[in-house]
Image (tube, helix red, strand yellow):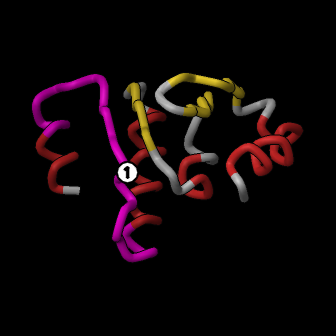
Amino acid sequence: MLAMARILRTGARMLLLDEITEGLAPVIVQKLAEVLVQLKERGMTIVLVEQNFRFAAPLADRHFVMDHGQIVEEISAAQLPSRREHLNSMLGV
């Protein structure tokens, strides 16, 4: 949270976030989600790399699945409900 606050003070319009939920308590993860939703509503561009699909899915406009550094699937938020079973099989869920 502190690192995000520092970046936001610079006036940046894009956040690059990598595995931000790693090792955090669930209550902190929930607060992070709330903050990201607020930033998104204010027009902030957010690039989120996250293995925690339950955290990332409701936040994203687009989902990219990568395998060995290559994008193998792009799914919009609107397509997500109908593609969930396919995604689960790809991700081994």
State the residue at coordinates (81%, 45%): 84
The picture places residue 52, in percent across and down from the top left corner, at: 53, 56
Q: Residue 2 magenta-drawn?
A: no
* Image quadrant in which you'd find residue 21: bottom left
Specify the amino acid type for callout 1: Glu
- Magenta-tinted stretch: 7-28
Please tell me whether residue 85 is drawn above or below residue 1 in the rendered image: above
For this view, does 45 lie left or right of residue 81? left
In this view, 27 is above or below 9: below
Residue in the image at 45% along x and 74% along y = 26
In the rendering, at what x and y percent does residue 81 appear?
83, 42
Compared across the picture, whether 28 is left or right of 65 comes to left
Q: Residue 92 appears in which quarter of the rendering?
A: bottom right
Q: Quadrant of residue 61?
A: top right
Q: Position of residue 50 (x, y in %)?
A: 46, 47
Q: Residue at x 48, y 45 (%)?
A: 37
Image quadrant containing the N terminus: bottom left
Residue occupied by mark 1 = 19
One can see residue 6 in this view:
yes
What percent of the width, then of the height, locates residue 12?
Answer: 21, 25
Residue 35 located left or right of residue 41 = left
Q: Nearer the viewer, residue 70 or 34?
A: 70
Q: Is residue 61 visible?
A: no
Q: Residue 11 in magenta?
A: yes
